[in-house]
Image (tube, rainbow, N blue to C red):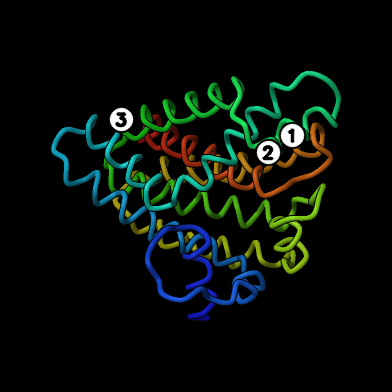
C-alpha cells in the first residue's frame, strides 16, 4: 500500500519522494486517487489560509495547487479545449486534442475554468476547507472516469482502465467521507459531491460523442473542471 501511495503522489504531484515507485502498484489501486487530493488540497489550502485577504489568498491557493501538481491536469484541460473547438469530424477533433501546440480553444478553456475556480474560492466560507474539498472530490472524479471511460487509444488511460474494476468506485467514494467532518455547511458539501459526480459523467459523454472514448487528457481535464465546479458550489451554497 505504501508503494501504491508513493506512486500515486509521484504521478499527481511534483513532491520530492525519492526513487520512482512501481506505478503498477497504483494502477491496480486507482481508487486511491482521493488521497492525493488531501495532500494537494491541504498544502494549497494552507498557503491560501496564510494570506489575510481572501481575494489574494484565493489566487495564492490556486497558484499553489497548480505548482504542487505541476499543472499536469491543466494541460489536459487545454488539450480538451482545442479538441472541443476543432472544426470537422471526429478525426479532426482527436488530432486537435492530441496536438501539443496550444490553440485558441485551449486558451479559452483554461482562462474560463481558472476564472470560475478563482471566483468560487474567493467567495467560499473557508479557503482552506473549500480547496481541500475541491481537490479530494476532483480526484474522486478521476477515479470514476478511470473506471467508466473506455479509451479511444493506447496510453495512460488505457493502462489504468485495463486494471480498474467497477467496484473501485465504492472505496474511492468512501475515501471522500472524511470531508463530512470539515467545517463547511452540509448543503454546500452535498452540492459539491453532486457536481463532483456530474462533471466526470459529462466529460465521459463528451468523450464518447466527440472523440470515441476517453484518454488521459480528458481525465485530467475532468479534475480541473470538477475543482472549479466544486468551488462554485461551495460558494453558492455555503
Percent x, y of residue 10: 48, 65
Above or below, 11 relative to 24: above
Q: Secondary structure at mark 1?
A: helix
Percent x, y of residue 93: 77, 29
Q: Secondary structure at mark 2?
A: helix
Question: Is 206 on the left-hand or right-hand side of 55?
Answer: right
The reply to whether discs 3 and 2 touch (Cβ–Cβ < 8 Å) is: no
Q: Secondary structure at mark 3?
A: loop
**Which labelled disc corresponds to residue 193?**
none
**Which labelled disc corresponds to residue 123?**
3
The reply to whether discs 1 and 2 touch (Cβ–Cβ < 8 Å) is: yes
The residue under the point 58% across, 77% down is 22
**Which labelled disc corresponds to residue 206?**
1
The reply to whether discs 1 and 3 touch (Cβ–Cβ < 8 Å) is: no
Q: Earlier in the sequence, mark 1 or mark 3?
A: 3
The residue under the point 66% across, 27% down is 82
Residue at mark 1 to residue at mark 3: CA–CA distance: 30 Å
The residue under the point 42% across, 33% down is 117
Eye-nearest disc, 3 or 2: 2
Residue at mark 1 to residue at mark 2: CA–CA distance: 5 Å
The residue under the point 59% across, 50% down is 141
Question: Is 231 on the left-hand or right-hand side of 90?
Answer: left
- Tell me the residue that label 2 is attached to: 203
Percent x, y of residue 34: 50, 60
Percent x, y of residue 5: 49, 73
Q: Nearer the viewer, residue 23 or 150?
A: 23
Q: Earlier in the sequence, mark 3 or mark 2?
A: 3
Amino acid at each position: 500500500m505504501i508503494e501504491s501511495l508513493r506512486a500515486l503522489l509521484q504521478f499527481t504531484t511534483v513532491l520530492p519522494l525519492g526513487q520512482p515507485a512501481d506505478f503498477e502498484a497504483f494502477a491496480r489501486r486507482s481508487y486511491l486517487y482521493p488521497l492525493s487530493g488531501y495532500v494537494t488540497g491541504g498544502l494549497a489550502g494552507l498557503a491560501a489560509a496564510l494570506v489575510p485577504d481572501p481575494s489574494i489568498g484565493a489566487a495564492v491557493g490556486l497558484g499553489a495547487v497548480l505548482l504542487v501538481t505541476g499543472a499536469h491536469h491543466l494541460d489536459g484541460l487545454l488539450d480538451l479545449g482545442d479538441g472541443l473547438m476543432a472544426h470537422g469530424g471526429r478525426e479532426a477533433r482527436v488530432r486537435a486534442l492530441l496536438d501539443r501546440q496550444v490553440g485558441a480553444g485551449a486558451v479559452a478553456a483554461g482562462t474560463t475554468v481558472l476564472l470560475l475556480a478563482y471566483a468560487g474560492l474567493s467567495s467560499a466560507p473557508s479557503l482552506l476547507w473549500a480547496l481541500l474539498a475541491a481537490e479530494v472530490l476532483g480526484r474522486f472524479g478521476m477515479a470514476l472516469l478511470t473506471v467508466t471511460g473506455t479509451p479511444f487509444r493506447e496510453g495512460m488511460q488505457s493502462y489504468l482502465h485495463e486494471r480498474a474494476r467497477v467496484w473501485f468506485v465504492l472505496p474511492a467514494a468512501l475515501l471522500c467521507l472524511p470531508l463530512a467532518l470539515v467545517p463547511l455547511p452540509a448543503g454546500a458539501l452535498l452540492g459539491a459531491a453532486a457536481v463532483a459526480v456530474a462533471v466526470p459523467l459529462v466529460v465521459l459523454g463528451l468523450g464518447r460523442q466527440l472523440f470515441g472514448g476517453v484518454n488521459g487528457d480528458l481525465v485530467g481535464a475532468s479534475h480541473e473542471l470538477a475543482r472549479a465546479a466544486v468551488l462554485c458550489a461551495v460558494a453558492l451554497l455555503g
